[in-house]
Amino acid sequence: MTNSPNSTSRRPFRTARRAPALAALVAAALTAGTPCATAAEQREDRSGIRLQRDADALTALGVTGVQARLTTADGRESTATSGVADLTDRHPVAADGYFRIASVTKTFTATVVLQLVGDGALRLDDPVERWLPGVVAGNGNDGREITVRQLLQHTGGLHDDYPDYTSEEDFQQRRYEGRAPEQTVAAAMTHRPDFRPGEQWRYNNTGYVLLGMIVERVTGHPWYEEVRDRIVRPLGLDHTFRPGSTPTLPRPHASTYQRFAAGAAPVDVTEQVGPGTNAEAGLVSTTADLNRFFGALLGGRLLPPAQLAEMRRTVPIGKEFRKLMPGARDGLGLFSRPLSCGGLQWGHEGGDSGWVTATGTTADGRRTVTVSMSGVLADSAEEVLRVERAASRLVDHALCADADDR
C-alpha cells in the first residue's frame, strides 16, 4: 500500500475589500447572471473563513500546526492551515500534508469486517475463538465468550497493555521498535479482563488488533491488503497507505512534537515506528483522502444498507470518555455526536505521539471535515481537554455551516 506523494491544487481564500456602493453593484450583476454559482461560492467563502478562524483558535492553544479540510457532496472544498510545519525552519503547514491517522484506522478496519459480514464470510456474533482458537485465553480471558461485535464496539472487556514512551530517553531508545499483533495480544493476556464481555464499555486497542488477525484468517490476506483492495483502490485514495516499519513520512508533511514532562522543551517525534502499526492504528493518510472515505462510508457506497445500519447502532460510551466527547455514543468503528444545528455527526478521532486527528461527517455523507493537528503540546489534562473542545467546535461549525441551505 505504499504510495508516492502527489501534489494537489488548492483554491485560495478570496479576501477582497470593496467600497460599499461598488460591492452592491458587483453583487447585483453577479446575482443576475449566475445566481446558483454565486450563492454556492458565497457559502464556500463563509465556510472557509470560519474554518480558518477555528484552525487559528487551535494554534492559539499551543498546537504547533493545523490543517483542516471541509468537503461537500458537490465537490467543493474549503481548506485552512495555521501555525508552522516545523519549529526549526518554521515552514508553513501544507494543506495536503501526510500524517499518521492513528485510531482513525479503526474505521477502515471495521468497514472491512462489515463488508465480510455482508459477504457472508463471518458473522458479528461469531466468537473470537472460532477464528483465532486458543489466542484469547488465560487469566480469565476467554475467546469463546467475546464476539466480533464486542471487539468492534469496545465491549469485549480485554485489558489493554499498550506501551507508551515514558521519557525522551525511552523514546530515543525505542522509537524504531514496532510491535507484531501477536505481541500486543499476548501482553493483554497477562492481565485479567477489565469486565465481563458485554457488561461495560471501555476503549480498547487490543480488540482491533484481534480484528485485523481475524480478517487475515478469514480472507488469507493481511488486514491492510484488504483495506487496500476493498477501500483504498476503489475510492482512489492515492495518499492512504500502511507505512509498516518505515519510520519516515512522504512529503509534504508537518513535523510533530511531544513534551515528556510539563514545561520541558518539545521533542521532534516525527520519525518513529511505534507500537501502533496494526489494524488499530497503522495507516497514514491526508485530509482529502479521509474526507472522501467518510463521505463514501456514510453515503452508503462502501457497505450494504444492513451492515451500515449495524455500524450505526450505538451504545453509551464509558464515563472516562464523556468529558472528552460529550454526548457521544459508539457504533461499530464509528462514533456519533450531536450537532449544534440538530441531528448527528459521525466519525472517529485518533492520537499518536503529538498528532491528533478529528473527523466528522453528516448522517447522509454529504458534508465531511477532517482536522489534523501536529505538535499538541499540552502539559495537563485540562489543556488536552481545551484542545479537544476546540477541535470539536471546528468540526461542528464546519458541518453546521449554512444548515438552512442544505
Image: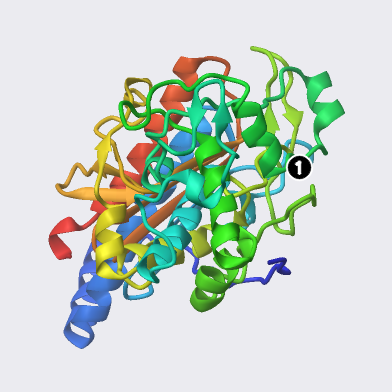
Q: Nearer the viewer, residue 186 or 235?
A: 186
Residue drawn where x is 48% and y is 35% of the image: 58
- Image height check: is 349 above or below 224? above
Q: Nearer the viewer, residue 307 or 300?
A: 307
Residue 388 visible within the image? yes
- Image height check: is 374 above or below 376? below
Residue drawn where x is 66% and y is 32% of the image: 186
Crowding at dot 1, Cα within 10 Å, few <14 / some 14-19 / many 20+, comes out as many
Give the x, y percent position of residue 5. 70, 67
Q: Quadrant of the C terminus?
A: bottom left
Residue drawn where x is 56% and y is 31% of the image: 137
124 relative position to 94: left or right: left
Q: Which residue is mark 1?
A: 273
Q: How is the image coloured?
A: rainbow
Q: Quadrant of the N terminus?
A: bottom right
Examine the image and state in which quarter residue 265 appears.
top right
Give the x, y percent position of residue 49. 37, 53
- Image height check: is 311 above or below 181? below
Residue that extends furthest to the top in the rendered view of this protein: 262
249 relative position to 108: left or right: right
Q: Nearer the viewer, residue 296 or 146?
A: 146
Residue that extends furthest to the bottom in the rendered view of this protein: 33
Examine the image and state in which quarter residue 76 appears.
bottom left
162 relative position to 346: left or right: right
Give the x, y percent position of residue 281. 59, 45
Residue drawn where x is 57% and y is 73% of the image: 229
Give the x, y percent position of residue 391. 41, 38
Q: Dot 1: what SS?
A: loop
Count of numbered marks? 1
